[in-house]
Structures are given as structure tokens and as C-alpha cells.
């Protein structure tokens, strides 16, 4: 690993920040204590809610950790398309006996307020999703001693991350669960995306900053593969959804290995932005018609998802998952890190032995 990374955590394992309640302080603390880098997800929280989780996490571990922010999105949604989708979802609202959310509930996710908290109360790492922060934002975080990670899904995006002065680029392959961190949401690119190993190789040839590889990684041998391709560490999300400390709903954890859910796909059904989820009824029925409208669709469907969780109906939940979801292991997060480290060591030994012949 690059010294930028090894100074933070000894093992090349980053726990992905998963918004929506999965990345709770207990999970981040367990990963950091085991020698990885735990992350909190500030997305969909208030600035004070984020601050309270940071305080709780600091009470659980003295190890470095990160906090992830969503960048504000431009107003590109067609209001008429959002209205049409709302009419389509009326049956869901009736079924779950709830109201649809207000699509105009806010666009910036409290970005400025959260930045202010993180500048007043610095954390070791801040990462960004859905774009590149302004150079002055990165510089201000550097001045308070915070390292910056930024997601990229192409080599071009990675170059933009480096130009902005970020310390690390997170190369996110199309296999990743949850939202793709594309810098611009272009509907014409739906169904595209670059596989992780190809992406890491392209990014390695495009930038000089360290790379963290993300997308479908579930085993230590896969970590070895991305390290060999040029990454300095691997970021795992779905692998930690099933961990004991994860805040994921029990239905979500169970669905990862439930044979009822046989595949994932990128869908706009729940948020209006491409995100990889297990294919359930909601994805099948609404995914083909969901508009490119983030965060409007996210706000619109939030009460439906909450009601589905309350009803114990996995067919109405956003079951975010990467392509390796069937390989999920229900273990304490610290033990999972230990297992991954052992698998990584075995893979490296096997590679060395093969090279010696």
C-alpha cells in the first residue's frame, strides 16, 4: 500500500460507507479496530445526526476512520417525468397504506452544514460520492489534517479527482452494490460501466495518486487481484452488509444469500440514480419506468421503503448489493477482516509459488 494508506490502516481493507443506516458506528469501529478503515455514511442524515455518530464512533475506537459525503446534484430532472412516476407509484402507496414523499424535499443533503462540522471537528478521512468537490473544499480539509478520497467510475473521472488535489481515488467498478458514483448522471450511459479490474488498470495508467478498488469484492483472493492490478487497497461494501454489527435490516441481510434473489441489476427505481440492487418485485415493476431524477425519486419512494421494512416485505425494499452478494458471510466485522487478511496472504503465497516455478 501507499504510505498515505498504510499510515492510516495496516490491512488493505476499507469498509464502504453505505448510506441508509448500514454503516453504523459499531460497524466502522469494529473494522478500524481490526486494522481496516471503517467508514460512516453521512448521506441522508442531518449535520447534527452525522456529528452525533462521529462522537459515538470516537467513543468506540481510537483508530482512524472516515466519513462519506454526497455532493449536491444539479437540477436536471424533468418535473413532468417525476409526476408521471409518482402516479405510477400510487398503487404502492395504497398497498403500504402510506403517502408518497415530497420530491422537492431538498437537493444538497445538507452538504455545506456537514462540511462546516467536519472542518470544526476534523476526522482522519472524508470521502466524496457523485462528483468532485471544489479545490477549495479539498484544500480546507487538508488544512485541518483530513485526507480526501473521491470516487471515480472512469479514467477521465479519476484524472479530474487528481486535478482537484484529492489524496486518493476510489475506482468503483460496475459490479459495486448501491449507487454508482458517476460524476455526471447521463441516462444515455445506462447499462454501461467498466468492470473493476479493467478500471483499476486504466486508472493506474492515468493518475499518480493511490487507488482504492471497489466493486463486487468478497474474498481475500479478489483483494489480491486488485492489488496486483495496481490498487493500494480494496473497498468492500456488500461483504459487510451481513456483518453482525451492520445496521442493515434483517431482511436485507437475509436476502443476500436467499435463493429467491438470483441476480442484481442497476436500477433507478428507488432513487432516480443508477444503483445496483437485488432484483425484487419493486425493481421489476418500476425500474424500467423510473426517470433520471435524483434526489427527487429518492424522496418520493422513501416512505414506501420505510413502510415495506415495517411490513417485513423484502419485495418493496431497496436491497443494495454487489454482484458477489451470494458470497456474503454472517460474521462479526472484526472476524471478517481477519478472514479476509488470511485469504489475502494465502492468495499472495499461491501467486509467489506459481511465479517461482
Image (cartoon, helix red, strand yellow):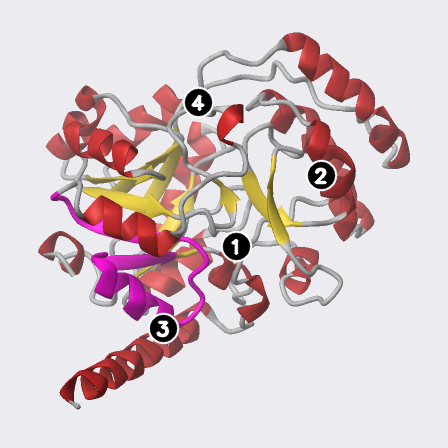
Label 2: which secondary element? helix
Q: Where is residue 140? Give x, y as percent.
A: 17, 26
Q: Which mark is residue 305?
A: 2
For the record, the magenta segment spans 208-235
Location of residue 306 (image quadrant): top right
- Work out whether mark 2 precedes mark 3 in sequence or the reverse, and give the earlier one: 3
Residue at 72% across / 67% down in the picture? 259
- Work out whether mark 2 precedes mark 4 in sequence or the reverse, and give the earlier one: 4
Residue at 20% across / 66% down in the picture? 10
Q: Is residue 221 magenta?
A: yes
**Which image quarter is the N terminus in?**
bottom left
Nearer mark to the viewer, of 1 and 2: 1
- Work out whether mark 4 precedes mark 3 in sequence or the reverse, and give the earlier one: 4
Residue 189 appears left or right of 166:
right
Q: Which mark is residue 220?
A: 3
Q: Where is residue 45? Give x, y as percent.
A: 50, 33
Amino acid at each position: 500500500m501507499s504510505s498515505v494508506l498504510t499510515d492510516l490502516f495496516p490491512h488493505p481493507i476499507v469498509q464502504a460507507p453505505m448510506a441508509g443506516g448500514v454503516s453504523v458506528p459499531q460497524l466502522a469501529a469494529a473494522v478500524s479496530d481490526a486494522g481496516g478503515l471503517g467508514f460512516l455514511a453521512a448521506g441522508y442524515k442531518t449535520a447534527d445526526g452525522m456529528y452525533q455518530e462521529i462522537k459515538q464512533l470516537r467513543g468506540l475506537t481510537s483508530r482512524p476512520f472516515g466519513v462519506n459525503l454526497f455532493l449536491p446534484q444539479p437540477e436536471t430532472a424533468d418535473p413532468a417525468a417525476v409526476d408521471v412516476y409518482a402516479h405510477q407509484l400510487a398503487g404502492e402507496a395504497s398497498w403500504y397504506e402510506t403517502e408518497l414523499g415530497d420530491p422537492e424535499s431538498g437537493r444538497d443533503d445538507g452538504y455545506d452544514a456537514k462540511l462546516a462540522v467536519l472542518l470544526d471537528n476534523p476526522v482522519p478521512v472524508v470521502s466524496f460520492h457523485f462528483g468532485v468537490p471544489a479545490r477549495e473544499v479539498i484544500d480546507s480539509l487538508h488544512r485541518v489534517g483530513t485526507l480526501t478520497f473521491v470516487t471515480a467510475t472512469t479514467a477521465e473521472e479519476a484524472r479530474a479527482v487528481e486535478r482537484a488535489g484529492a489524496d486518493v481515488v476510489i475506482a468503483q467498478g460496475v459490479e459495486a452494490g448501491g449507487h454508482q458514483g458517476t460524476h455526471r448522471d447521463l441516462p444515455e450511459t445506462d447499462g454501461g460501466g467498466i468492470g473493476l479490474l479493467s478500471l483499476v488498470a486504466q486508472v493506474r495508467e492515468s493518475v499518480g495518486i493511490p487507488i482504492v478498488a471497489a466493486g463486487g469484492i468478497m474474498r481475500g483472493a479478489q483483494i489480491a487481484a486488485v492489488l496486483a492490478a495496481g490498487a493500494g487497497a480494496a473497498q468492500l461494501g456488500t461483504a459487510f452488509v451481513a456483518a453482525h454489527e451492520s445496521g442493515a435490516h434483517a431482511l436485507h441481510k437475509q436476502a443476500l444469500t436467499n435463493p429467491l434473489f438470483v441476480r442484481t441489476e442497476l436500477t433507478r427505481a428507488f432513487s432516480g440514480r443508477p444503483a445496483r440492487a437485488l432484483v425484487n418485485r419493486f425493481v421489476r415493476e418500476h425500474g424500467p419506468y423510473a426517470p433520471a431524477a435524483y434526489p427527487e425519486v429518492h424522496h418520493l419512494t422513501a416512505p414506501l421503503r420505510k413502510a415495506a421494512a415495517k411490513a417485513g416485505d423484502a419485495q418493496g425494499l431497496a436491497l443494495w448489493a454487489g454482484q458477489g452478494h451470494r458470497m456474503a458471510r454472517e460474521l462479526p466485522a472484526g472476524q471478517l477482516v481477519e478472514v479476509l487478511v488470511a485469504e489475502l496472504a494465502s492468495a499472495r503465497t499461491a501467486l509467489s509459488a506459481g511465479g517461482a516455478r
